Image: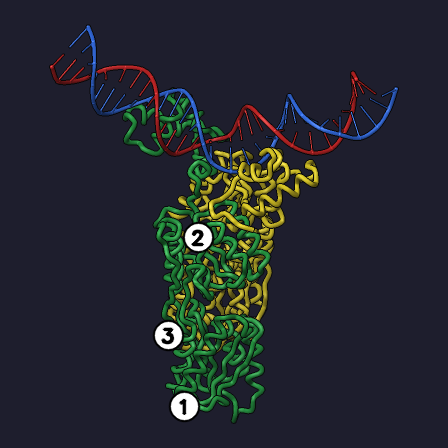
Chain colours: A yellow, B green, C red, D blue
Amino acid sequence: MAQQSLTASVKDVAAAAGVSLGTVSNVLNRPDRVAAATREKVERAMAELGFVRNESARSLRAGRTRTLAYVMLDAGNPFFTDVAQGIEHAAEGAELSLFLCNSDARASREATHLGHLEQQRVQGILITPVDPESPVLDAIAHRGTPLVIVDRTRRGAQFCSVAVDDVLGGRLAVEHLVDRGHRRVALVGGPLSIGQVADRFEGARTAWTSAGLPPDDLTLLVADSLTVAAGRSAGERLAGIPSGRRPTAAFCANDLVALGLLQHATTTGLQVPEQLAIVGYDDIEFAAAAAVPLTSVRQPRQELGRAAADLVLDEAGNPQHEHRQVVFTPELVARASTRG
Amino acid sequence: MAQQSLTASVKDVAAAAGVSLGTVSNVLNRPDRVAAATREKVERAMAELGFVRNESARSLRAGRTRTLAYVMLDAGNPFFTDVAQGIEHAAEGAELSLFLCNSDARASREATHLGHLEQQRVQGILITPVDPESPVLDAIAHRGTPLVIVDRTRRGAQFCSVAVDDVLGGRLAVEHLVDRGHRRVALVGGPLSIGQVADRFEGARTAWTSAGLPPDDLTLLVADSLTVAAGRSAGERLAGIPSGRRPTAAFCANDLVALGLLQHATTTGLQVPEQLAIVGYDDIEFAAAAAVPLTSVRQPRQELGRAAADLVLDEAGNPQHEHRQVVFTPELVARASTRG
DNA sequence: GCCTCCTTTTGAAACGTTTTAATTCGACGC
DNA sequence: GCGTCGAATTAAAACGTTTCAAAAGGAGGC
């Protein structure tokens, strides 16, 4: 069972087995068309030489690769790794490799990744873009690589996209708080330029006014990012409000912010949920695992990924594909942080 | 600026610009060798046709790809995404793409990924393996793909590897607890078959006995996985011990377990750190962000990734490469969870 | 023994790029 | 005006695979 460390080619295998190169290829691709004895001979030669198919040559010849790619916005956020896992399941089912890239929320990094992926001729690109309106995305789609936007939406029907109804999510969160008797509520998160944040807060306001509550009692605390640190700093500002006017509950634009807020409250002795109830968004694993388990709006993360993969595969394989905007429904998960 | 949606090749560009195919290639690869006027003509043609280089053809011709790969053990664990980020920086510097795969701690999935990567002829593979002793790894290295083991070690010098001194880490954790006056301590984590866990606990025992403390006062609480849920269940077992004999501190094999334990303590009213001090391991972002910020043993995650990438690049490019085992030094980060 | 039919095997071409050696062409020195 | 040199360009080959039409072997019928 000697193995060569320099990679053997189909030609080498053919020579070793004493057959033609076409036969080796047949063994690889239509084993039924080759006589059992020959096949065995070839397979033995492949094992002896340590033959490994060259995917570059394969996809050059085929005109397409067996690869899908997902460009994540932030690999450090468990939300996106869960989405990636959903995509991976779908890719696995279609016998495709999944290429994961991380833009880290930087447009330049994203562009570099997209450039590489286009050169690789991946079958399709899934992306949670830094900016869904970027013309870079149009250029790619225009040149022919199927592209699906994940967890963002975009005006017009240029692309398929998969998202969650953020307006509804915001509504659910605030309805829950109103149900629990809260009459002064804070909205915490930002920047407002992020579509998700704007939508969630819009839903929150709708719920608030539908309940007939005065708009002035819904306080907006804008944060400059959706991070734990931003949540802590919002906690400070909240604590600065005189207790008679201070909100008794906060709806945070994501779980990281909510965890930061929770941390600040706990360390300063503010009781959660007695003095401050908290609702997060995303329902990441750490939300349930927090010291006070967090009420949160759950998004179907894995399904999001799976649906996106299905769309991109349809676009790649189905000639009469039509772009679709899939919208999932979020769900409120009530836990101790709002259990009065 | 009309663009073709069917991908144009070098040949098409050559025809459109009225030059030979070799000239187009020169524009791409040695622009200085081609006259300014011609170059401009070619570049215009490329833009008009929306030309995108075909990476498959390129790497087939070159005999190697411009790609590195990292097979992660668990994409959901922030520790590994941080390692990945370190690798990515190194890859970016070397103008390589980084292919991220997730084995999800399943050997079969890992094998599938490795097979694909070998076919892709990636320049090198970085991997945190399910089982560092697996012969699959040897087979790959033997066939010639540079492979570096990340965050695990392996007997013998078959591969390069990059790891952190877990024995020392365990020692630091327990020395810290002893310093703070704790005389009954629990070790929480498992399964013990994981090398990391065994090493950390070994270091813990060394510190304990070196301090002249009786071995019986160091309790081992074996968990069946390194997850938040396992930490909670360990909390229950801990609470079951009569308070006179109950450990006053716990050293957890990783932060997820520590967070679970912390959560259980908080919800059952056990004061942290007054009644139970907790030390975690990994210092993931959520450790500092916990309701009671967690003391933890920090590993240089990004440096780990960067060093691994450097090793694999050396192995790929340097003919007189020699396998090395790099070991980093961990560091204790003291926070509120042990601040008596 | 010849023809047909079916199974198995073969040879050649093609995918798109890079590279090397060869060619063209104008300028320059003599 | 001839030879030479250098810069710019070209033509052809190669990378490893798949595919397709064609060829080679049998087996069987007459």
Q: Nearer the viewer, residue A149 or A275?
A: A149
Compared across the picture, whether A261 is left or right of A19 comes to: left
Residue drawn at (32%, 26%) of the image = B40
Question: Residue, x 58% and y 68% (percent of image)?
Answer: A334
Q: Position of residue A225 (x, y in %)?
A: 40, 59
Vertical position of residue D11 compared to residue A332: above or below: above
Which chain is home to disc 2? B
Question: Helix, strand, or loop for circle 2?
Answer: loop
Provide the residue designation for mark 2. B146
Residue A206 shows up from this direction:
no
Q: Amino acid at mark 3?
A: Val
Measure the C-alpha gap from mark 1 to mark 2. Answer: 46 Å
Depth-wise, is mark 1 or mark 3 nearer the camera? Answer: 1
Percent across and percent down for residue A282 are 53, 61
Q: Nearer the viewer, residue B295 or B103?
A: B103
Callout 3: residue from which chain?
A: B
Callout 1 and callout 3 share a chain: yes
Q: Position of residue B16 (x, y in %)?
A: 41, 22
Name which residue type carries label 1: Gly
Query: Circle 3 sits on which residue?
Result: B333
Q: Quadrant of residue A246?
A: bottom left
Marks 1,2: beta carbons within 8 A: no
| Labels 3, 2: one chain | yes
